[in-house]
Amino acid sequence: MSSKRNYCAGCGGTITSKIVDGVNREYCPECDIVFYYNPLPVVSSVVVNKNREVLLVLRDREPQRARWCLPSGFVEIHESIEEAVLRELHEETGLTGKVVRLLDTVSYRNEFYGDLIWITFEVQRLDGKLVAGDDARDARYWPITSPLDLAFPPNVRAINRYRDYYQGLWKMQDSFRRLDKGRKIDPS
């Protein structure tokens, strides 16, 4: 969420506006500085267990308080996006993990925070006891194949991408399980 600046933090002078790159931007004529507003980076993790259940947290803060979402949060200054996603996972669920791959990146407009860049990673769980922490009321696994009504559309999109990516592999694994169940073992 951004609000208009009235005074320059550098010189204390009054902020005006100026067209730069075809956009009306805040400008300090004393310092000759243009102020840019950029989207905030948000990270999420898709952690799926061996039962094909995705880890979700129940939000305890606005926006979207009391709604389920992926473990998510803002990237801090001097922190990589990979460090941020693992920090948020640990803060919200008590789990540690390792980044497997970038899953999705999407622009998202949120009425509470404004323009966001939502970056989602597939994360493998390494250790820890699952417990709601930080700004989460609850943390648990949900079947990834069930339709999920989540707080943030970028989370739904990322889970769908994950599901699409692994659909073929899951079909193959399921067919092997069916073969194993139907096979008779020769005791000799």
Image: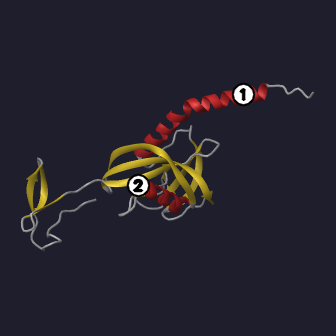
Left of 99 or right of it: where is 77?
left
114 vs 64, left or right, is left
- Most extreme residue toward the right is 188
Q: Earlier in the sequence, mark 2 or mark 1?
A: 2
Residue 57 image position (x, y, % from top left): 52, 55
In the structure shown, which secondary structural element does the residue marked by tag 1 occupy? helix
**Quadrant of the snapshot with the C terminus:** top right
Q: Quadrant of residue 28?
A: bottom left
Question: Which residue position is annotated with label 1?
Answer: 178
**Colour theme:** secondary structure
Image coordinates of residue 33 in percent, x first then y, are 12, 62
The image shows residue 119, relative to residue 131, as above or below, that is above
Quadrant showing the N terminus: bottom left
Three-letter residue code for mark 2: Ile
Secondary structure at badge 2 equals helix
How far apart, in angstroms, are the residues tagged by discs 2 and 1?
Answer: 40 Å
Residue at horizontal 33 percent and vertical 57 percent from the top: 112
